[in-house]
Amino acid sequence: MMTGNNPGWWLTTRRLRAHGTILALCLWFVYAWTLATPGLRDRNGNLKGGDFLHLYTLGLLAIAHRGADLYNMNSQAVLAAQRVPEAEGIRYLPLYPPQVSIFFAPLAHFSYGWALILWWGFSAVAYGICCYGVWRACPNLREQGKTLFLLALAFPAFFHLIAWGQTSAAALACFTLIFFLLRDRRELLAGLILGCLIFKPQLGLAAAIVFTFIGAWKIVAGAVLSAAAQLSVGILYYGIDPFRHWLRILWNVRTVLPLLEPKPYQTHSLRTFWSMLAPVFLPWRSAVSLVLYVMSAAVVLGLTIACWKRSPAVSLPLRYSALLFATVLVSPHLTVYDLVILAPAFILLADWIKCQPLTASTGWLGTLLYLGYTLPLIGPFSRFTHVQVSVIAMAATVVFLWQIGRKGVPPADLALSKMAGAGIGEGRNLPSNERYSDLPNKNVSASGKRFAHADSWCKAPSSTTNFRRFSSSPARRRIAASSLTSSTML
């Protein structure tokens, strides 16, 4: 994108728009052509909707109150074939907790075709609302609405979300809500939303570790309460036995990974990265790849925790983006459709980069975002190279975010972030007249002219000189800071 403070960034708005248009047309034209067949099988012979059949079958079990069959692959295959004859011979490994079946029970009252259309609509609307909401919170991207729309439409992860009929749009909605709740310092509510990810517990692993290590106990407590309440719904509906079966399957999941990941080249996490990279002839191959996964995941989590501990010197968009990338990398099981949870990170980081001066860090970060966006398209090539390059790009993104946080921000930015920080607990030790919630909600300078958006985390250029001019005493610092936007550093 062409930026005011960063004119040297090589990705112009016109290029991004052109790339997004071409990519969106190619992806969706090919998919529409593949689906344009009579019946529920596409041109490749695959069932339309893919994984949605499993969700649909779970809804059928919920309607019949057959809790004993929630983790019986054979019974589910028979039921699916009875209701959807085109699904003959398709089997799925049941890993969802019991309450998920109750959620899909209303859709199971429809035929499979209509239920799939409704689910596609829900997923697309949820994805669109999340992208739109984050974009509206990014003042530096306000004029790039068309470009953002095209890039969101062409995002490979969104394409796979629809093609597979998966549940990742709900996870994206949770992560988007968590960001806004953290921005508003509603930590308990953010924890309650985080606990909703228990339907995909692997996506909540990184957040649970990070928030525990930084001592965000309200978030942790809210997550525990929310997860317990959600699991209780399944227990009340089916009894305790299905819940025990679910725990048993999770405990032994490593023994059934080949069934869970029949296409490892479509996975994008550190665990599968090392398992694909380890040579087949290597002794103790699985043990070596597991050790490498644990070590690399610990490094990624350590860098993410370091970013959060540097609050408020590191703004919330940077910290939260690092958390989202860490969520993808650390997840024990993550398929390409789960990458939709990175959509807020791409938008937030693009907005942050646009208002930064051109440096090596911002230049490389922009390049890494472009690579992280497009590289999932070439995931199938890892069948031959055994290197999932998207994982390398995402890990490098976390490293660069950590480096940006380690270098810190200029003194003016740091002082301002202490005044207007929106990080977890970062305003509690400030005097009441300096807290974020007590600052003006308008972007008015000392002369009464508005120069920045209320949601901006970028420093207004015209006010830097004023801040440094009046920075000789604490009182003058407060006067100078009050002339800046009240939420400059989130």
Image: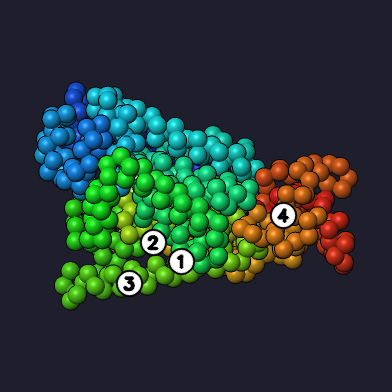
Residue 58, visible in the rendered structure: yes
Q: Position of residue 180 (x, y in %)?
A: 58, 46
Q: Residue at x 55, y 65 (%)?
A: 215
Q: Earlier in the sequence, mark 1 or mark 2?
A: 1
What numbered label is drawn on residue 330?
2
Q: Earlier in the sequence, mark 1 or mark 4?
A: 1
Using the image, determine if residue 189 lies above or below residue 430. above
Q: Secondary structure at mark 4?
A: helix
Q: Secondary structure at mark 3?
A: helix
Within-10-Å neighbours for mark 2: few <14, some 14–19, many 20+: many
Left or right: 281, with 357 as reference point: left
What numbered label is drawn on residue 420?
4
Residue 400, visible in the rendered structure: no
Q: Amino acid at mark 1?
A: Leu
- Residue annotated with mark 1: 301
Q: Position of residue 58 (x, y in %)?
A: 25, 38
Q: Amino acid at mark 2?
A: Val
Dot 1 and dot 2 residues touching (CB under 8 Å): yes
